Amino acid sequence: MKKYLILASIFALTLSGCNTAKNADQTADSSATPTTGMEQHDQTITEKRWKLVELEGQPVTMSEEQQTEAHFVLHTEGNKLTGNGGCNVFNGTYSLSEGNRIQFSRIATTRMYCAGVEKEGEFLKVFELADNYTLHGDTLMLNVGRRAPLARFHAVYLR
């Protein structure tokens, strides 16, 4: 009789353990969907080429002499920033925090002269001043405080 009670207890514990594991799997599955914005923001603004389309409210177009469009990329690995101001390449680091906060640091750039590229210095200044961003679909705006965007960018997807 004791043997049957022990076996019944072991059987009940085993069933209970399976049910707990099943509940844990369901909980893990439901937590797989993002609930906070930070993970989503990292994924939505990083690993994209952001082409400069507006600087201080003025449209930006490439000049005939310009070899490359002004752009930047935020790489998730190492929080690296890379880009091109239209003439010179630049790199640095960035950090993202809650409330769409962004901070750029350790910006370094080459210093070549390129004819027809007048706005590159103003573009690079955006990375010194920007402290937050706004994202609407494929349009990213880098801002300082609550004033009008310093710069507006469109995502470029490479095929």
Image (cartoon, helix red, strand yellow):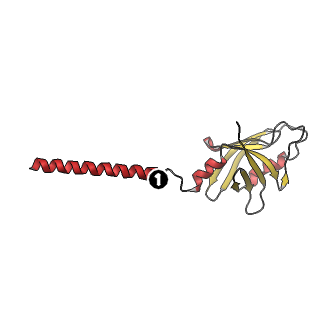
Q: Quickly name the residue at label 1.
A: 30
The residue nearer to you, when weighing 132 against 3, is: 3
Q: Compared to 48, does 151 lie above or below?
A: below
Q: Quadrant of residue 62?
A: top right
Q: Residues within 10 Å of mark 1 (few under 14, many from 20)?
A: few
Q: Quadrant of the C terminus?
A: top right
Residue drawn at the location 66% of the way across and 48% of the way down: 45
- Judged from this view, the residue extending furthest toward the left is 1
Q: Position of residue 120 (x, y in %)?
A: 83, 45
The residue nearer to you, when weighing 124 against 25, is: 25
Q: Compared to 63, does 99 lie above or below?
A: below
Q: Position of residue 55 (x, y in %)?
A: 82, 52
Residue drawn at the location 79% of the way across and 38% of the way down: 110
Q: Position of residue 32 (x, y in %)?
A: 49, 50
The residue nearer to you, when weighing 147 against 134, is: 134
- Left-right relation of 154 to 62: left
- Left-right relation of 25 to 39: left
